[in-house]
Amino acid sequence: MKYDTLILEKKEYVYLKRILNISGYAEDFETQKSLQRLTDELKKAQILDELDMPLDVIRFNSKITVKSNRGWNKKIQIVIPALKDLDLDRISILTPLGSALFGYAQSDIIQWNLPSGLQELEIIEVTQDQFLEKIEVPI
């Protein structure tokens, strides 16, 4: 792991904690397990101000290329639940793959239980999308 812990921007961390609190009732067991693991990892996460965020860390609206040890490569974007759109490769943070990648950095390798079983995921590339607004969290 490149930075030793997950790294999250302060406002995104607050927002993520809120949606994890209300989405603990996911019907799918694999999704529940992924969200619980993300919740556990957030307890050790490094929380940074916007200006201190490394550009290679996966956050809301990041565009990611990820490779699995099962032979697939995907280009996706992790978004808040309201903006998910599979036709545009935008996946919600509340999916097993979204929760697996959030807060990790380019070149990290993660082992995560996805609906198809335990997989090793390598983060090939991370870019920040300047065209979608960063998430605004109501205080």
Image: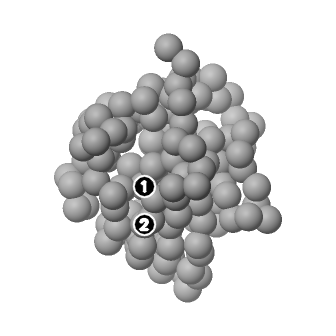
Q: Is residue 42 above or below residue 99?
A: above
Q: Residue furthest front?
A: 131
Picture residue at 32% right of the left edge, 71% below the top: 107
Toward which corner of the image does residue 57 lie, by quadrant? bottom left
Q: Nearer the viewer, residue 40 or 128?
A: 128
> Mark 2 sits on what residue?
126
**Image coords of residue 67 (percent x, y):** 49, 77
**Image coords of residue 44 (percent x, y):** 27, 36
Query: Is disc 1 in contact with disc 2, using a CB cutoff of under 8 Å?
Result: yes
Q: SS for tag 2?
A: strand
Q: Nearer the viewer, residue 117 or 107?
A: 107
Picture residue at 73% right of the left edge, 64% below the top: 88
**Image coords of residue 20 (percent x, y):** 55, 30
Report the disc number at residue 58.
1
The crowd level at tag 2 (other Cα within 10 Å; few <14, some 14-19, many 20+) is many
The crowd level at tag 1 (other Cα within 10 Å; few <14, some 14-19, many 20+) is many
Q: Is residue 12 above or below residue 138?
A: below
Report the disc number at residue 66.
none
Task: Please report whichever mark, 1 or 2, sits nearer to the chain's N-terminal start.
Answer: 1
User: Does the image show residue 136?
Assistant: yes
Picture residue at 46% right of the left edge, 59% below the top: 128
Picture residue at 54% right of the left edge, 36% below the top: 135
Identify the amino acid type marked 2. Answer: Val
Q: SS for tag 1?
A: loop
The quadrant of the rendering that contains the N terminus is bottom left
Identify the amino acid type marked 1. Answer: Ile
